[in-house]
Every structure is written in structure tokens, then in C-alpha cells.
Image (spheres, helix red, strand yellow):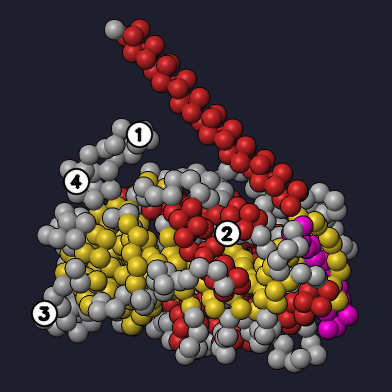
Amino acid sequence: MFCAIRLLNKVLLNLITLILISTSVLADSVKSELAEFIHENYTKNEYRIPMRDGKTLFTQVYLPNNLDQKYPILFERTPYSIKPYGEAYDTMLGPSMHFAQEKFIFVFQDVRGRYMSEGTFENMRPISNNDLVADESTDAYDTIEWLLENIPNHNGKVGIYGTSYPGFYAAMSLVNSHPALVAVSPQAPMSDLFLGDDGHHYGALYLNHAFTFFGSMGTPRSGLEQSKPSGFQFPEPDAYSFFMKMGPVGNILNYFKNNEWWQQVLEHDTYDTFWQERSIYPHLKGISPAVLVAGGWYDAEDLLGTLQTFYHIKNQNRNVECYFVMGPWTHGNWSNTGDTSLGIFDFKTKAGGFFQKEIELPFFNYYLKGKGDLKELQKVTAFETGSNIWKFYNNWPPENIVKKTLYLESNNKLVMQKPVGSNLNGFDEYISDPQKPVPFTQEITNRVPKTYMVEDQRFAARRPDVLFYSSQELDKDMVVSGPIVADLYVSTSGTDSDWIVKLVDVFPDSTRDPEELPSGTHMGGYQMLVRGEIMRGKFRSSFKDPQPFVPDQITRVKFELPDINHRFLKGHRIMVQIQSTWFPLFDINPQKFCNINKAESNDFQKSVQRIFRCSQYSSLITINVVPE
């Protein structure tokens, strides 16, 4: 019997291996066919396009060989290189494989100061507000003007797209845009490096990610270059251990001595002019092109930028044609066409393929070619996590949502009734120790694992420095959509503190384990992270003018967690977790009011943290519930 089981397992293993090999071969075959199609149907040329200040930007143009019709221009600007350079052809044109076959004039450009383009690179270069001074908006404008005058067989219409940093450049093209620019798709745009995205979240340094990302974006180059400089190599596999040994964040410069950007980051520890000038939000006004904003609910890099770019475009422009898509994706994962999953969670959809074929391509076809119509395309397409279905809305958040308040109560309870009585002893407390910060993941890694955004939080809830509050089992499904507001009454024995709030979906204890679960993982009682965010306490009233806490004085801390669209299923429970460290996702607050970027080791101190839950000081979470 044992031998038979071993033989069966071997047969199954061989079958799975054959399937994986076949899938890989098929994918390689499709890529090979697409590359051959591009080479046969397009002619590639390279240009150095002059900007208004005399600098030239290196640009590639792929022109369809068939001249029987005119084509619109589809344009991407990137700091990540437009290789291959020279005679070699790219193997994919446009944001997905559908675009090359559809036929556009494809344009790719190294942004100012990167790779083969002249000039000096500046991270999220501020808008100049001077027509004679170049910025990312004017570089896009000047490039479009040159293309219209020098590239043959175009139809006079231009579209721009980009994901992540290229998403920032796409958004910048909307500012004082060229009249020929009629369609723009900023996808997961990096938008504000102090309030969210790759740099900080509400003033707290996004340490683990920013450390390597800024390390690759801030070192001056010696001249024009086709290859990327090698990035930082961690000396050990455990980021938690590495950053604890590194000590205060000012020690980052020990690893990036010639990195001008890190020097600037550490010099500006408040939301001063340096950071404000680099935010795209105030400039998203007077927009005339149609816009498609896209992003993922599990984007660990630019989630807030995606959401706030959409909100600012909608709120600051009365008549803009703006479409909004949020899928079950990690950062940029909508570029994939296969099954969409994250860790142990299978979303049971080919979400990327759906977006590419049913939304992205029709959007650009309609506005650039006048092809098809968008009558069936809703203004908002949002994947509903928890149920794994697509939802379509006219607005975001959805219309007719009902605000509900979840109050923190004694005995780890989360209730919908405000606590009664005025007993100021209605609080829970924990000791926050900077020498033993709460890890953000159980995984031993020196990167930010994408799976942390759905990871089981039981490991955190069991720590003495993490508070948790849980609702009763839901007697029916509850769909929560839009932003979440944490409104806490707290005190700390120190003069500064971070406050992390996590919204968690707790599975029933009786949930059965699927057969394919990794060893040691169990779904019964699983505490799935739905959303988490940090507020650096000294910025609770102003990001420009930080204020210390008065030790042991009750203080209100209110902030917003990024949007969700999640269905808490019947039988599940809603949990809120609160803590003061989330390491090394974020840097450690010394819990002493100071310039944290210049703090010394002896500035870090333990603090007694209290969360109040009495009638006079009711800590609560506000959610938006979609009526069934």
C-alpha cells in the first residue's frame, strides 16, 4: 500500500511538472510570436528630442509599416530605461500584448537625467510654474510637439500611460497638457512621498522598501549610460535583524554615502516645502484629457497614490471623463494575464487579462482611434475581496453607503454601541519597547513580501504590545467600501509615539483547510489583514508643524486608512488591532519628541501606551457599509 501511494505521488508530481513545462513553453511561444510580429510590422528609430532648455531626451519610436491608415501615438516616459537600445527591438509594445496587434505609433523615452537622456535627474521633480523652466510636464509637452512635427502618418492624437514611477510621469503630463493629448492612464502613480507611497506614510519612514528603492534612485551618474548601476545587497536574509543592527535611521548614510536623495530625505523630517512641491495632488486641475486611473488593493508601494490621484482628479475637475479601476493586484500585477492570487488566497479570476482586454484597450481605442464605444464601461470597476467578484459603480465610494461606527470596548470587544459611563479607567494599555518592535511579517526576508497584506495576524495579536478588539460573528455578509477612519483617544508616557491600526477579517474557527495549504498554515481562526496604516503621532494636528505629546495626557489621534472594498462573510468577525511599532516596514519612533532622522541611540525609550474606551473618550473606527 505504501509503495502504491509513493508511485501515485510520483505520477502526480510528473504530471504537474509536465503541465508547468507546457504552460511555460506556451507562454514563451506567445512571447516569441509577438516579438516576431513586432519586428515584421514595425520600424524602430531612435531620436534625441530637444527640450525648451536645450537638453535632449533619448526617445524610441516604433512606427507601423502599413501606411494605409494614420495611427495615434501611445507614449510612455520612464526612469527605468527604454532598453534595448540600438537595432534590437523590444518584445512588447504598449501596456499589454494587445496593443502591438491593434497598431499604434509607440514612443518610449528615458526621462531627464536617466540612462541615455541628458540633464540632471531629480526625484519627483517639482512643477516649475515658469514656461521657460523645464519640468516633467513641459518635457512631456515638448516631446509631443516634436513628435507631431517630425513623425509621419499620425492622426494628431496622443495617449500616455505608465505604472508606478512612470505613472507619476503620466499624471504630470495632465498638468498644462498638450492639446493633442486626449487620453492618459496613470497606473499606481507615485504621488506624494511624505503622506504615502514609497517614501513615508503619514510622516513615518517606509523603511524596508524606501531603503533599497531610494538607494537606486539617488546616486549621481557619471554620464550617459545604458545599464543600471547595481543595487544594495543585504549582508543577511533577515531585514528585521539588519535594521535593528543599523540603529537610528540617520545611519542609512553609512550605506549610501554618495546618495544625494537620501541626504535630502533625512534633512527634511516634516512636510515642508521640499515635500509639498513634490506632491502631484495640488496640480491635478484644469484637466482636459480623459483619464483612466488603475491600481491594486494589495499594492504595497503606491496604494494611497492611486486612490488620492483619483479623488483629486474627480474633486478638482468638474467635467473630466475619469475612469477608476481597482483590482485584486499587487504593485503592477495587472500586467499579468494568468490566474490572480496572493499567497494562499486565490481570487479565482484572470483579473489582469480582464483589465487589459475589457477596460484598458477599449479606453485607448475609443479616445485615440474613435473605435468602439464605452457605454458598457462603468466609471468605477472595483474588485470585491472576500467574495472574489467584480463590482461596477457610477461613483466611488459607492452611492448610498451607510457609515457605521465600531467602538472599542472592554474584554477585547468591538461593538456598535457607544460605551456608557464616564469612568476614566476605561482604557487598555501596553508597553511599547523600541528594542523589541512588533514585526510586520513572520517571514524571514530582507524585502517587503507582497503577501504581508493578507498575512495571518495571529502572531501579532498574541504579543503583549498589540491590542485587539473583535466583533461577534456576523449574522449576515457585510460589505465595507471606501476609506476607514481611526479616531482614537490615547495617552503615552513619552512625548511622541506612532499609532498603527489594522482592520482584520477573522475566519470562523471551524473553517476547513484546503488540501493545498502550506504546512503549518490553518484557516480556522485565520486573521487576514485587510488594511493597516500608521500615523506618526507628532503629526496628528499638522504634518508641517509637529507637536509633542504631554506625557500621560489624553490626546485625540484621528487618521484615515486607505480604501478597501471587502466583503466580511457571514460567520466571520471584524477585528481591530492597535500597536505602536510595525518593523521594519516603518522606522522606529524613539517615543521622544525630536527630529527622528537625527536621533541618537540613547533617545529611544520605552513608553506606556493607553487606548481609552469610555463614554467621554470613546476610541472608534468608522467604516462605510454598502446596503445589500
Residue positioned 11% across, 81% down in the render: 421
What kind of residue is marked 1? Glu
Q: Which residue is mark 2?
A: 209
Q: Is residue 351 left or right of residue 234?
A: left
Relative image position of residue 247 (x, y in whole percent): 59, 59
Which of discs 2 and 1 lies nearer the camera? The answer is 1
Residue 531's quadrant in the figure? bottom left
Q: Alpha carbon of mark 2 to alpha carbon of mark 1: how far?
A: 30 Å
The reply to whether residue 11 is visible in this rendering is yes
Q: Nearer the viewer, residue 370 or 5?
A: 370
Disc ID at residue 516: 1
Circle nearer the N terminus (4, 1): 4
Q: Badge 1: few (under 14), some or many (20 or more) residues near its Cα, within 10 Å?
A: few
> Does the CB distance between marks 2 and 4 fall below 8 Å?
no
Q: Which residue is mark 4?
A: 509
Q: Residue furthest bottom?
A: 130
Residue positioned 77% across, 80% down in the render: 145
Q: Which residue is mark 3?
A: 420
Magenta stretch, residue numbers: 51-65
